[in-house]
Image (cartoon, rainbow, N blue to C red):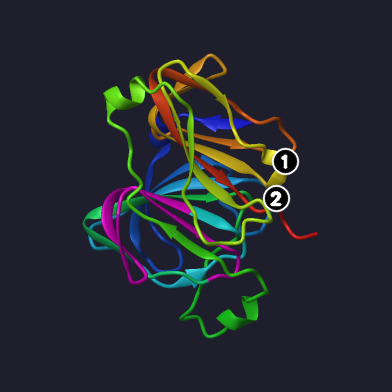
Amino acid sequence: MQIVSGAEAKRGREYELTRETGRKQWRTQYIGARTREIGLEPQAFLAEMGANGLVVPHFHEVNQFQVLIAGSGSLGRSPITTIALHYADNHTAYGPIQAGPAGLSFFTIRAQSDSRPVYLHSPDYKSFLKPSKRRYLLATDIVLSTEPVLQHRTEVALESLLKDADFSDGLGAYMLRLGADMKAVGPDPKTTSGQYYLVVGGSLECQDTTYRPWSLAFVKPDEQPLMACAGPLGLEALVLNFPKLAA
């Protein structure tokens, strides 16, 4: 399992102009590295767009979750306020992403590394398209517990966040909620091509370390389910299951 503290990751935050469009943003690499090739290694980073920034419509060649965690804006025709969750299958176009006047921050999370976005304004974009299920799923207004309510929970909750889609290949997204010092076994990663835990409230106690928001863990499909251990204020974490890859 790979796990990265949010506080540690943000020490590597970098300001950048994106290579393809010159968009101004800040980028924090969490898991994996930038690459110009599609690979089997996980890849996750935090993008923080400037005020009124724009990401034009595009698609990726791998499956992808995005978790919008701060600011406001819109995704396609849908206004979004945080926290929101977006999933797109490989070769499935989405966008534009429009940041509001306070900016927009989102995690981009992949079980495979991606080479680059393919923009729909590129004259040759159709040459990159391949068949896929073309699922485009959006969950908005994901609610976090207040600190005392989370701390004093007495039951484990695992709430599905995605509805009305084909989940037969292992795709899924859940909110895990635990009270103070509670423990729970997470979903089995063997039904997926990889699984992420994003801490959004309280803390995750793992490997003798406390992981607070916005820490991120990746569990490989051949590993055992994660034993999630909440800290003294409880734990809320998004659990993101990637669909199994086609043989």
State yes or no: residue 9 in magenta: no
Left or right relative to 183: residue 69: left
The correct choice, above or below, for 12 with respect to 168 in the image is above
Q: Secondary structure at mark 1?
A: helix
| Residue farthest toward the left in the current orientation of the protein | 101
Q: Amino acid at mark 2?
A: Leu
Check the picture and name the quadrant holding the N terminus.
top right
- Please name the residue that numbered disc 1 is placed on: 190
State yes or no: residue 74 in magenta: yes
Residue at 56 percent across and 40 percent down: it is 196
Q: Which mark is residue 151?
A: none
Q: Which mark is residue 40?
A: 2
What residue span does the magenta drawing correspond to?
A: 66-92
**Residue 175 position in % (x across, y down):** 46, 40
Q: Amino acid at mark 1?
A: Lys
* Distance between the alpha carbons at the discs numbered 2 and 1: 16 Å
Left or right relative to 29: residue 99: left
**Residue 101 position in % (x across, y down):** 19, 58
Residue at 65 percent across and 70 percent down: it is 132
